[in-house]
Amino acid sequence: MKENSKTKQMKEHVVDSFDKLMTTNDGSPVHDNNNTLKAGDRGPSLLQDHIYLDKMMHFDRERIPERVVHARGSAAHGVFEATEDISDLTVANFLKKGTKTPVFVRFSTVAGFKGSTDLARDVRGFSVKFYTEEGNYDLVGNNIPVFFIQDAMNFPDLVHAVKPEPHNEIPQAASAHDTFWDFISLMPEATHMVMWAMSDRAIPRSLRMMEGFGVHTFKLVNSEGKGTFVKFHWKPKLGVHAVAWNEAQKISGFNSDFHREDLWEAIDKGNFPKWDLGIQIIPEEDELKHSFDILDPTKLVPEELYPVKIIGTMTLNRNPENFFAETEQSAFDPGRLVPGIDVSNDPLLQGRLFSYMDTQNYRLGGPNFHELPINRPINGKHNNQKDGFSRFDIPKGEVSYFPNSKATGCPYHAMLKGEKGFQSHEEKIDASKVRKRSDSFADHFSQARLFFNSQSKPEQQHIIDAFSFELSKINDAKIRERMLANLNQVSEELATKIGDNLNIKPSKELDELTLKFARQNHPDYPLKNKKSEIEKSEALSMLVKPNEGTIETRKVAFLVEDGVSKKSVDDLKSVLEKEGAEAVLISGKVGPLKFKEGDTEEIQHTYKTDVSVCYDAVYTPDGDSIAKLMNTPEYFQFIEEAFMHCKALCFGEEAIKLLNHSKVKKDKGVITAEDKNWQNSFVDVMKLHRVWDLEEDRKNPS
Ligand code: HDE
């Protein structure tokens, strides 16, 4: 991996203890790290043991508060390269065509604690810190383009509602409980976002296969000071994919680090994840032109109205050296801006501008967290801010104020020397001071409907299943009813199908009652149905489009036993590897596996450690192994579960016997060596990610 200004800066702080003598924190060499100092062999221990005190005092203080939301995260370093000339829109240095900028990216779940599972049904955070030549720019987004609430004032309530309930701290990393849905059912504005949260977007196959969104509308500012509204999008090169809900639940049990491990391993193996950065460009003149308000964070801007223009590519190419020092201590903040980018007046974004800095002051123990290696800007920082806990820099000289003559006005502000620096976008505001919700934010259902209408049939079914699961977990029937009434505003079909699973019939009376409740809580709440300009948007569906799929970095389980044919293994393996996928041999035992041809290979994965939910597809090769597999219940469990989760399955010619003996039924996603062009057909099915359209048949094989 090539060095860049950030890796060089961080390198100075990396400590390598190999072949080094152990010391105390002050560098005093330690003679014995096994025994405390005692009065006599059998004690008592002595308080003067500074080596023990030094060690234990540090240990006692090893934990810092976890993030109040987005506590569980995984991160990586990389580089962003700007690929388009957008100098007409922005002076941002790092967006100049050809510029390469080091980045640090942290992905996260929202509700779970730091040690919770990766596969929770949840929104994923997608935070990018660009270490630009003009300071750090943080794009702190999510993998869903809209948010639950419109105003920052509601954020602590939203988070209190979704986090484990305060009396018993149950459930962990899950929204399927009363307090969350109680809150949501009383906040019609959350309906659009919960449609996304109940969709497969909330259970990604990999962090490398998620989109990212800035969510809010931002502003780009050019050299004339002209502003242009933009929405930011990250588009993953590997496509956008999810697992099945039943699979997610099982992965959480088998490997709660599934996403973290997947990201780490991909980078470790040189399979660097990549995303394109795109912008939707909305001229200032269009600000008030639409059925929705571009400042309302519960609304997206349909790509049909403003297409996404790709302006750069990000590659993650280095794992952190140390989780705590880098991932945990990284501090993101949407208010960390650089010249050429500014915030809009979105009331949720405005509220975030206080919260991040505030929480980091608390979480990282004071105002000098900017000096931690992971947070340091590469261009250095120069100002008169002084002192505070854990100051690393040693500022020179007697001056720590401005204006000054003693240091010739330094550090000088840009205007002093005719330079620009960061200038807020100039905007005319002529308004009364009010505490209210804008009428232009009043339509809460039409984009939720747009989202539902844009999903393929299997995706719609997954949304219905997810709502049915979550709402069934609620103890208070009134909450279920209110939620159903909200969903009835989105689509009668959606509400009726979910209602069937909950024993509730959507009705006008229920709708009115719900409205009354919402009104009681906030009497001035604007609620107006509008018609969306767009009925359906292809960009909102995750269905793989023809010829767009790839199997790069996908993991295929090869189920083998002693006597398996090496040729049968190697032939398909080479086809898959050519396409960038990985074959993993799984057997009954670790250790050497004997091939029919006589060679051996070390087995690292067995039915004891590995399950089908951790793989994308399954192959059973030919050979004398078939007889053993015929008597291996775990084998059948593996293929039958993969079948239920709509994965591609492949069987060698002799292995068809096993297929016939199982509950797996031949369909377009089950390929055998008797099929024409079978190896390529297997690859083609894998490219679809899953045969979701066969889900109903596969769940109930007749
Ligand atoms: Fe955050 N959010 N948020 N948020 N958020 C935090 O900051 C907050 C919102 C997002 O990888 C906290 O350092 C408020 C929207 C991500 O370290 C905290 C509001 C979006 C991360 C905070 C929002 C996000 C955070 C907790 C509404 C998508 C993880 C720890 C006014 C655009 C950053 C921290 C990381 C983290 C506050 C809403 C994304 C408390 C007050 C909308 C990805 O400051």
Image: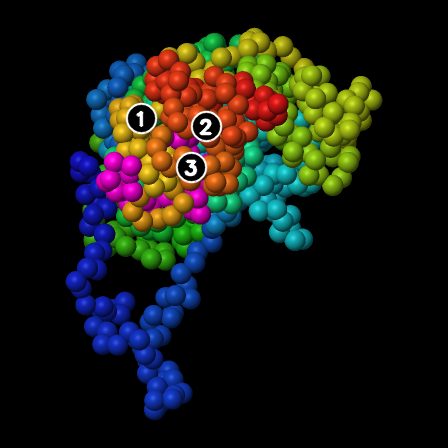
Q: Quadrant of the C terminus?
A: top right
Distance from mark 2 CB to nearest ligand 1 atom below 8 Å? no
Q: How many tags in the picture?
A: 3
Q: Quadrant of the N terminus?
A: top left
Residue type for callout 2? Lys
Report how far apart the C-alphas of labels 2 and 3 lie in the structure: 10 Å
Tag 3 or tag 1, which sits nearer the N-term? 1
Q: Most extreme residue toward the right, as rendered? A: 509
Q: Residue at x 67, y 53 (%)?
A: 167
Taking 570 as reference, is 240 left or right? right
Residue 85 visible, this angle:
yes
How packed mark 2 is, by other alpha carbons closer than 10 Å (few <14, some 14-19, many 20 or more), is some
Taking 266 as reference, is 436 left or right? right
Tag 2 or tag 1, which sits nearer the N-term? 1
Q: Residue at x 39, y 27 (%)?
A: 654
Residue type for callout 3? Ala
Residue 284 visible, this angle:
no
According to the image, label 3 marks what residue? 627
Q: Secondary structure at mark 3?
A: helix
According to the image, label 1 marks what residue? 572
Q: Secondary structure at mark 1?
A: helix
According to the image, label 2 marks what residue? 657
Q: Which of the two residues, 278 or 173, is positioned nearer the viewer here? A: 173
Residues rendered magenta in the picture: 594-621
Q: Quadrant of residue 249?
A: top right
Q: Please determine whether, in this image, residue 202 is positioned above or below residue 603.
A: above
Residue 520: percent from left, percent from top: 77, 32
Distance from mark 3 CB to nearest ligand 1 atom below 8 Å? no
Residue 389: percent from left, percent from top: 36, 58
